[in-house]
Amino acid sequence: MATLTVTDKDRFLINQEGQDFSHEAKTFIKIRELALKNLKGLDFPSNKLEDWKYTNLKELGKLEFRPQSAANIHADKINEFKIKNLDAYFLVFVNGFFEPSFSDVIEDKESDFLVTNLNTAKKEFIKLVEPHLGTQTRAKDQFFVNVNSAFSQDGAFIYVKSKAKLDKPVQIIHLVDGDLVAAYPRNLIVVEKFAQAKVVLTYDTIETHSALCNSINEVVVEEGALVQLDKIQNENTNTYHISADFAHQAKDSTFTINTLPANGKVIRNNLNILLNGSNSTANLFGAICLNGNIHVDNQTFVDHAKPHCESNELYKTVVNDQATAIFNGKIYVNKIAQKTNAFQSNANILLSEEAKANAKPQLEIYADDVKCSHGCTIGQFDDEALFYLRARGIKESTAQKVLLDAFIGEVLDHISNEAVRAYANQLIAKNFKSQFAALKN
Amino acid sequence: MKEEDKIIEEATSGEYKYGFVSDIESEKSQKGLTEDTIRFISEKKNEPSWLLDWRLKAFKVWEQMEEPDWAHISYPKPDFQDIIYYAAPKPKKKYESLDEVDPEILKTFERLGVPIEEQKALAGVAVDVVMDSVSVATTFKDKLSELGIIFCSFSEAVQEHPELVQKYIGSVVPQRDNFYSALNSAVFSDGSFCYIPKGVRCPMELSTYFRINEANTGQFERTLIIADEGSYVSYLEGCTAPQRDENQLHAAVVEIIALDRAEVKYSTVQNWYPGDKKGRGGIYNFVTKRGICHHHSKISWTQVETGSAVTWKYPSCILKGDHSVGEFFSVAVTNNMQQADTGTKMIHLGKNTKSTIVSKGISAGKSQNSYRGLVKVAKGAQGARNFSQCDSLLIGAKCGAHTFPYIECQNKSAKVEHEATTSKIGEDQLFYCNQRGIKTDKAIGLIVNGFCKNVMDNLPMEFAIEAKKLLEISLEGSVG
Amino acid sequence: MLKIKGLKAEIEGKEILKGLNLEVNPGEVHAIMGPNGSGKSTLASVLAGREEYEVTAGSVHFEGKDLLELAPEERAGEGVFLAFQYPVEIPGVSNINFIKTAVNEVREYRGLPNLETKEFMTLLKEKQQLVELSGKLANRSVNEGFSGGEKKRNEIFQMAMLDPKLGVLDETDSGLDIDALRIVSHGVNELKSKDNAFVVVTHYQRLLDYIVPDYVHVLLDGKIVKTGSKELALELEEKGYDWIIKELEEEKL
């Protein structure tokens, strides 16, 4: 008899089974089936893959993560995760499952916008969901995208009718709770012609010794629409976070995403922006301030498919303790995308002996009439500037803080909501508190 | 088609000018690669047994390797069993003077515009001519030997200085380093060897002209340069190859050892046959070039690449010693159907090591031009510094320019800066030149040479002139 | 020398020149004045052959040749020189290399042999002095890092080197201080002869104090609507363009 070897992939996938999706409309079941089919041909990501060169998931592969709903959830705890002073609609998900009792739902068919969970929308607003769900995530080669597509439990659905404006931002709160939990939240945001929306995504942990949050955000930005997404990842140091964000932009649209990975064990973000209409603009900003043992890997892919588009990318990273930061940004300019302006900048500061930063800023250009540039730096805070501040009587720790604020501030300024910005600042300050406290002594 | 496009198309469709074949009898090995082939080569070259063993070890490694496909190039994979691994012009024993050299060979060089006689006269350049794998003439040898400098063919070095060869061969590029280096290690035919003794400053540029000549012969050159403590040498490598219909494989290995306080400047002008407009023929150039720097030493690579159908080349520096310096200056021009994936690796291991990368890529026609580089700062590389600048210039709308830099940093006191831009030749700039009476193709030449200026400035004078000419030839319809 | 008849030109479908007539003879200096957007710079660009502009009607003859048929470099060879309003920067190409290439290309066009290095250097020094252009600029990249005044003086210097029959100065005075203006004008006046001619496109009268025109043309909405002597320029400076518009409207009535 031949020996049966169970690969990490087999074990991982077997553990995900057991959820029943048979109640879903056929069209949605098809998405799951396609993903399962794709998974057959894919291996569990290893360092041998160029995309996973710098992020090792060996340990993750050995853990028996399973989808499971949370046991007891206290209202007090949930409210902690709502951003202070933020006037918003809130949608709360725990372990990928919707928690309506903590959420503000707008499901009025007459309303200019809908704010609800995806499972409801799949039933009630199938016409609005069907044309968009899963259209951007067909990526055959991405293991975790397909895992989410196959096993996703639920997520948010936000829809803004053409020319309308979502009157308040929506904060989508995704929480993990319990041990060996696998959560697969999937949000769909559809913003029609000339409409506007601001969404804040926060990922937190209630309590866990080991969890996986594998999330997907699909954003449809139609002609002339304006969408801003703030994504804040603040899970505990036992949580793996692997996410993929997809934005599909039509002409004259603007999409902005601010990524702030603050805490977690391993965070991997894949941003996929498709500029599929002329005169569209994509802004990708990242503020990455890391301490402890965290490993953060940001991958961005900006696809200039049409002429006269612009993309701006600025990722700033400060790495402390034993943390590792990876930036892998790619700008792809299609041969018809003349008059493209694409800018990418990645700046890294290493604060400690053990800190690491790797970067791979790539340009792949097939059109000739383009202006593309990228810049990447790795270094320390400017000694001259530090000295200058100290010479003016500012303590070294304060001086460092001032410089850090200035360095990261350039990115945080793009978060337009004050309450969200304050929250982001607070997270960063907390991360580096010990660093500056140590310096004071 | 717009008038301007037409001009650009004309300007970028210059056919290879050096396409002619010199008719020299040669002695070849059988096609194909087995242990016997290797034994044949080794025997032909009368090699010591340690070298044969070394080759056979490399062959075993190679057999287990797969041809890499991660580079941004695509080409029909060569059939390694359909290559003649050894071809040497029929030997006429040793040459005492140039007069004994096959006149056909001399004529070939004359037609290239670099006649040996003139080369000899050129500001103290000693030329070690490598034609189809075997060194046929070496000049200025006496003068160099007075200083204790060894500059000879690799085979000669194996016979005359086995202790040096044995000590350093494979020390920078091990046999198993990559697919092509393993292949080269197994079957290398000849190449150049250079040793500069302690404290000696080589008074002249050492120069080798490579030339691929026999149809269907792979060229497996091996170059070993050892700069002993406190020495200096500037080494020039220039290549042109005659036109051929079949793709020719070239997998060279260059190893440089710069011992404490030594400085090596290695300049290349590469102008192998790039294939015709439709991409037929042309050289496959898969080269491994690497140097290791000991304390306070410096290795500087300067390259002007205009030839080959497919180029895969990353001259690199391992900055092992404290305060060592690595430099890479590159101009890579691709036209018609050419593909180039080239760049460098700077591995910072020692303290206060410094590296500079300046890469200028120019793509025209339907070519694809990629920069791929690695800057790695290891944990112990306190105070390491790197500055990289990668600029791409696009001529015409059918080509592509790509940049794939890898930056890995594990030391907080390091400073790494990378900048890259991609642009086309501005219509404003062309119009300005036109208005001053300068024709578009000439204007492109002017602007391209301007674009490459800070790399060309690093080439030795006589080489720079040739390189500039090459740039114009590869981008214009007529001789510049 | 230059005969423009019924010239119409547009850019991106928008008509800028709407039937312009102008005749320039050797030895003459013509000033073209007009408010912003009247088509002054378009005229200069069309004469030099900038491709973005499409000529839809009319003709331009230079020394009997159909100028519109010629490529920009051929026009330069024929002797049409445009001093750019915004001279472009060409990184890495030294000024001296640039002008040497241009001189020899133009000479080749005119059937003259290349200049020997010595002759070229003599000419270079002489012409540099003409516009007080520092020799240091010769080795710098074309227009890169030049001040506004240096760029304009560099334009006049190039004109001197290329020895054109017709010099078209496009807003050469813009952004110049008095000293630079004096130097630039001095250069132009020195170059002036009975065999060549200048078309000076300007917004302000002050340049015309230095380069005295034989004719002043007012360009309005793509046409030359009024021609006068240098006094007309003064009148325009004082009263603006509105009175001409009014005058025209009255004529129409």
Image (tube, coloured by chain):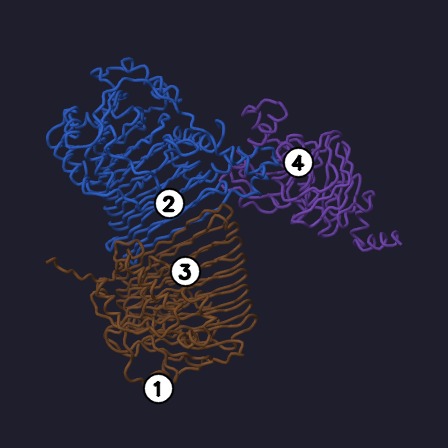
The picture's colour for chain C is purple
Label 2 to label 1, Cα distance in Å? 55 Å
Write down the quadrant of residue B184 in the picture. Answer: top left
Q: Quadrant of the N terminus of chain C?
A: top right
The picture's colour for chain A is brown
Identify the chain drawn in blue. B
Dot 1 falls on a residue whose secondary structure is helix
Which residue does the numbered mark 3 point to in the structure image? A272
Which residue does the numbered mark 1 point to in the structure image? A75
Query: What percent of the width, then of the height, locates residue A410?
Result: 45, 65
Q: Is residue A305 above or below residue B437?
A: below
- Say how many tags the image has: 4
Amino acid type shown at disc 4: Phe
Query: What percent of the width, then of the height, locates residue C82?
Result: 66, 39
Amino acid type shown at disc 2: Tyr
Query: What percent of the width, then of the height, locates residue A9?
Result: 23, 62
Q: Which mark is residue C81?
A: 4
